[in-house]
Amino acid sequence: MAGPDLAHGTDDDAAPHLPVRGCSARGPRRLGALGLLSAAGLALTGCGDQHEPWFGGYVNVTSYPWFDFGAEAAGQSRTVLGFVVADPEEPCKPSWGGYYGLDEAEETLRMEKQIAVLREAGGDVVVSFGGAAGNELATACTDPDRVLAAYRTVLDRYDVRVVDFDIELDDLEDQEANERRAEVLLRLQEERKEPLEIWATLPVAPHGLDQDSVDVVALMLAAEVDLAGVNLMTMNYSESKPAGQSMAAASMEAARSAHGQLTALWGAAGQDLSAEEVWHRIGLTPMIGVNDVPGEVVELDAAAELGEFARDQGVGRLSYWSLNRDRPCTAEDGDPAEANDFCSGLEEEAGEFTRVLGEGFVG
């Protein structure tokens, strides 16, 4: 059954309100059929203090040769480490990329040592669960208690206060997994002594979020998860981007479209947020340089344009894929016209995208 009406428009001219702070009212928990996602059926959610806007690139921690993020990301306020997925042999056990258990990650990737270096430099890490490869834990593991234990193990081991759930492909389409994840995330927030900032990272097109992505957000709000925001993967548009439209223009259109949808979703959850408040619950994540879709390229000028848009709108988060790629290609990297894990495919100084996108954000 259809969820709330998700008009694509925005209310950019609405008078700004103060952030919603300290709300505690909650109705009964209601999950299951999306027919429950009406204004009357959704509980009041997402009422915690608003986070400070932040900037931080993703790192593909398991790509080889391994990336020294402890050194390369020093000075960034946050670094997003991807991806924790289910162990292929033990679906309720967390692993990095399906390759390394947590102990193996310390031995091989120097995970804790690199995190310590970042923190000593004044930064911190975000752990991203899911991604395009492997199975997210709530998809692979059908026991909610064991999913909870797996998430808890990762958060406790790395002392994490901000988490990112990159839900795409098969994970995105799995309704039971999305319900299970939402219920477990509420339990995880309730059991922790300090607030846990949770972001849902979802694919987007210039016309906005598709129905599967809308359902993921709606289910989290229905479960009463205090959702910090929705991070839009502004990349790889393929046929959804009109011919001739620039990547920057497509990304800004996608953000505006999603803004209208998210306004409706939080409104259906009992929160009539101002345009400013909804922008604060949106993140943007471009893929720098050559994208996976042929012909789609985010150059430095486009990154600067998108960064300025993010600052002007007051988004709560700006990330990018990935730190590993923020350098020019060498002969060993292969054809620069094809996307790879190790370079942008553009003539640039190493670190240029980090500098351009991070301008004006904390860190």
Image (cartoon, grey):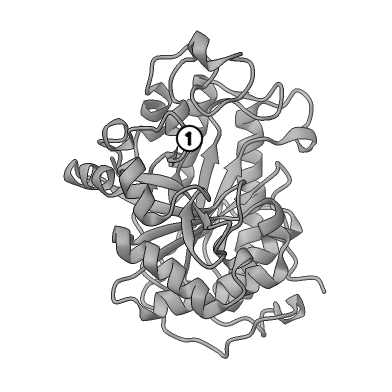
Seen from the viewer's position, the closer of residues 34 and 67 is 67
> Who is closer to the viewer here, 78 or 27?
78
**Crowding at mark 1 (Cα within 10 Å: few <14, some 14-19, many 20+):** few
Residue 207 falls left or right of residue 224? right
According to the image, label 1 marks what residue? 63
Name above or below for residue 215 compared with residue 8. Answer: below
The part of the image, by quadrant, that contains residue 360 is top left
* x and y, in percent, of residue 304 in the image: 47, 27
Q: Which quadrant is the N terminus positioned in?
A: bottom right
Say whether residue 223 is left or right of residue 172.
left
Q: Residue furthest right?
A: 1
What amino acid is at disc 1? Ser
Residue extending farthest to the top is 331
Q: Residue at x 44, y 14 (%)?
A: 348
Report if residue 18 is visible in the image: no
Image location (x, y in percent) of residue 163: 43, 58
Rendered position, 18 above or below 164: below
Q: Position of residue 234 (x, y in %)?
A: 60, 40
Image location (x, y in percent) of residue 77 = 30, 44
Residue 72, above or below 17: above
